[in-house]
Image (cartoon, rainbow, N blue to C red):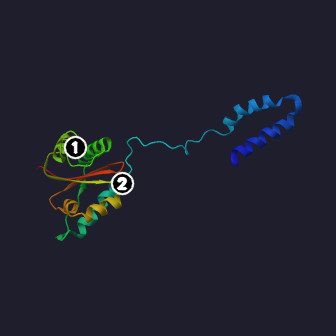
Amino acid sequence: MGRSFFATNYISDLYKRVGNSIKLPTLMLMGLFIFPLLFPKSSSCEAREPDDIVLFSRSKMLSLVNKARRSGHYCGKKWYGPAGDLKWNDQLAAAAKIHSTDMSENNFISHKGSNGQFVGDRIYTQRYFWTDCAENLAYGILYEDDVVKEWLKSPGHCENIMNPVYTDMGAWPIGKYWTQVFAKPQN
């Protein structure tokens, strides 16, 4: 009801005040120009496709991973004791973004990219020189909590998260494709 009801009443009241001196079609034409001024289009209700908006929280992802590392965790039947906190690394996040984008655009999930590169190659292209590295992938999950929970259920992914050798991490989702990269830099 709101605005359109108000506008209809406004035009009706205006017509009653001016009487027959202004014809109804002229009044309606005036309304076409007055209405947008009274009620500008609101952009808050418009929907748009996100361009390259990161729809996840880096700090939340890092916090969830570090929480698991601090408490220790079973990866399958193997116990991993507490490990030191990882630091967020933008170069590793960029390598993760490259791979998530590749998988999303080419509709596949694999550690081997469509250009034949693996995680170590992608990390090097970001000028991060590593001694050890690993990668976790996921598909079909929307939120940080859920993807970390699923990775911790999978022995191989869990081992990557819990491995005390790694000191840095980056991750990036594109749609429902997730890539998480771990590494230890060269000294």
Q: Which of the 4 image quadrants contains residue 161?
A: bottom left
For marks 2 and 1, give the one nearer the viewer: 1
- Residue 80 visible in the current orientation: no
Number of numbered discs: 2
Question: Which residue corresponds to the image point at 18% horizontal and 45% vertical from the top-left?
Answer: 118
Q: In this view, does 177 lie to the left or right of 51?
A: left
Query: Which numbered dot is residue 113?
Result: 1
Does 155 sit above or below residue 119?
below
Question: Which residue corresponds to the image point at 26% horizontal and 49% vertical from the top-left?
Answer: 109
Instruction: Name the foreground residue: 92 vs 153.
Output: 153
* Category of crowding for the residue at label 2, using alpha-carbon neighbours closer than 10 angstroms: few (below 14), some (14–19), many (at least 20): few
Dot 1 lies on which element?
loop
> Whole-Å distance between the Cαs marked 2 and 1?
25 Å
Question: Which residue corresponds to the image point at 73% horizontal and 45% vertical from the top-left?
Answer: 5
Dot 2 lies on which element?
loop
Q: Which of the 4 image quadrants contains residue 52?
A: top left
